[in-house]
Amino acid sequence: MNTNRRRLAARSSESNPTRNEAGVGLIEIVISMMLLAILATALVPVLVQGLKQAASNATLATATQLANDELEHVRTWTTCSELTPATVNVTDARGVVLTVATTVSSCTATPENPASVPITVTVTRHDTGVTVTSTTTYLFITGS
């Protein structure tokens, strides 16, 4: 009788497959892959926006440095004859061409009557014409 019970128990375990299943099934794998695909698709725009912002920040940092360098150069001027507008094209490390333009207002300073002259430095992208940065300073001129 024990042998009959064993046979019966073996048959019942064979006919009930849920009791013997172990591991991950194909449906679980497909569902996991779909969830990962949805998550990856949701993160792609964030990654693209981050890359665009990094490129924009690199151009802005370069333009700001160029404007500061030009202002340092302008600060060495002391007479009206040195105040000359200038435009220079500079290529940054990423290959973006930036135009640095120095604009000088009319100078009426004389040795007897020094004056403050406004000077504007503007950095624009050469390819788009968009102004990246612009700054104005007043330069104290002591001679003509």
Image: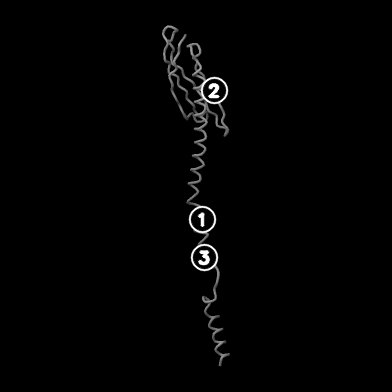
Q: For this view, does 111 lie left or right of residue 21?
A: left
Residue that appears at 47% across and 25% down: 122
Report the colour scheme.
one colour
Classed neighbour count for the residue bearing mark 1: other residues with Cα under 10 Å, few (<14), some (14–19), many (≥20): few
**Would you identify the image quadrant in which residue 1 lies?**
bottom right
Q: Which residue corresponds to mark 3? A: 28
Classed neighbour count for the residue bearing mark 3: other residues with Cα under 10 Å, few (<14), some (14–19), many (≥20): few
At mark 2, the secondary structure is: strand
Task: Please report whichever mark, 2 or 1, sits nearer to the chain's N-terminal start.
Answer: 1
Which of 58/130 is in front?
58
Q: Which residue corresponds to mark 1? A: 37
The image shows residue 35 at horizontal and vertical percentages of 49, 58
- Say if 11 sits above or below 53 in the image: below
At mark 3, the secondary structure is: helix
- Say if 7 sits above or below 108 in the image: below
Q: Residue furthest top?
A: 112
Which of 45/113 is in front?
113
The image shows residue 15 at horizontal and vertical percentages of 53, 80
Residue type pointed to by label 2: Val
Residue type pointed to by label 3: Glu
Residue that appears at 50% across and 22% down: 72
At mark 1, the secondary structure is: helix
Task: Please report whichever mark, 3 or 1, sits nearer to the chain's N-terminal start.
Answer: 3
Residue type pointed to by label 1: Ala
- Say if 107 sits above or below 5 in the image: above
Disc assigned to residue 88: 2
